Image (tube, helix red, strand yellow):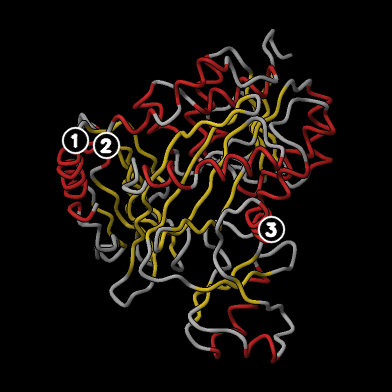
Amino acid sequence: MRDGKKVLLVLGGIAALQDIILNAQKKGYYVIVTDYLENSPAKKIADESWMLSIDDVDGIVEKAKAEGVDGVMNYCVDPGQKPYQKICEKLGVPCVAGFEQFDIMTNKDRFKECCKAYGVDTIPEYKLDASLRAEDLAAIEYPIVIKPVDGRASKGLTICRRAEEVPQAVSYAMDHSKLKRLMVEKYLENCDEVQVKYVACDGEFFITSVCDWHSCYMEDGTRVYVDLLKYPSKLMDEYVQTTNDKVVSMLKGIGIRNGAVALTALHQNGKFYFFDPALRMGGAQDWRIVRAVTGIDISDMLTEFAMTGRMGELEEIRKIDKAFAAKQSCLLYFDIRTGTIGTIEGIEEAAKLPAVTGYLKCHEVGDVIEGYGTTDNIAMRFMLRCDSIEELRQTIRKVQGMIRVLDVNGENMIVSPIDPDMI
């Protein structure tokens, strides 16, 4: 307790957590944020902050005991998943899952094994490790994707179309793997990418969103990052009819009973091929889309679980199932090229549009963008909620026309935005 308030420890200080922290404070909790960065955005609004990396499990546990922390939560920080479980276990406070569940949901190879056991389709893979054995290389049919088994946000990932590209891709993947293991899969082309989100309460699972994932590319074909996430997915009905039951059976079989689950899949020839799991909310703040449509806040459920050990009343949470599909919504991204940001304009104007329910600014003037293919390329994202697909398309055009991001030489940094007619 602190000043008569229960103490909530939040792992990570990214900007996406600010909204969550403010809500926790409104509920009467004293909020502490910890990470290794002095000026993390979430630390600026927290009641207290610590300079302890989320990987410093023992250091956090020692300080949490001394400071009377009542609950801990990792809302959406990907590398915080396993430390969160360890910290909760050592402190004896509620955790949404145990070691086994987090180990499966953060290791792509273990997750793939579970999918196979429950009849959930996965992308065909090839045997290969850092030794680059000749017999393994000879069995590969290109193109392929090489990535770390524990990688996130596309870091460490390379698409290889020729054998000569493999050694460098393997080295890159190993550099981004704490486990020092990689995964090699067939690169599926001309397919749709879909993201499915669930919330679990006392062993029951409810679909909170299904979206179409549109990627952004440079003129030469280089993938920048995400262009737009469209809700609901055009494939939602097919997913529910053909695949949902198998996925829920698997999640229950793994032993997940509470929390937020995120799964990404590629759709081709009537099958959903899963490849990217997480036992957390998404860092893109899609929960704000769900809240804007349904009035139900998934982040509030996680806050209550941290402090009480319960997600909430099952009958109330049940109302969230597929309710997001009542509106046409999207997360609209503005991806930028390499360079130094000189000017950012139009955010406040765009935020006043009736269909804009929120935004997240990811960079500031002076920030340097050095590469492509990761979350570092996101300048900002907007949350849009509309009554019809045509209204959504019109709103996207309006927002796109308002936003400008220029480099220090006055040149446009925004990569060609998505054509709204494509969604």
Q: Mark 1 points at which residue?
A: 388
Q: Mark 2 points at which residue?
A: 328
Q: Tell which of 276 and 218 is nearer to you.
A: 276
Q: Is residue 177 left or right of residue 187?
A: right
Residue 280 picture location, percent across and down: 59, 40
Q: In which quarter of the image is residue 407?
A: bottom left
Q: Residue at image x 55%, y 13%?
A: 27
Q: Quadrant of the N terminus?
A: top right
Q: How far apart are marks 3 and 2 (CA)?
A: 35 Å
Q: How far apart are marks 3 and 1 (CA)?
A: 40 Å
Q: In which quarter of the image is residue 167?
A: bottom right
* Residue type, label 3: Glu
Residue 159 picture location, percent across and down: 49, 75
Q: Mark 3 points at which residue?
A: 113
Check disc 2 and report its element: helix, strand or loop: strand
Q: Residue 376: in sight, yes or no?
A: no
* Residue type, label 1: Ser
* Residue type, label 2: Gln
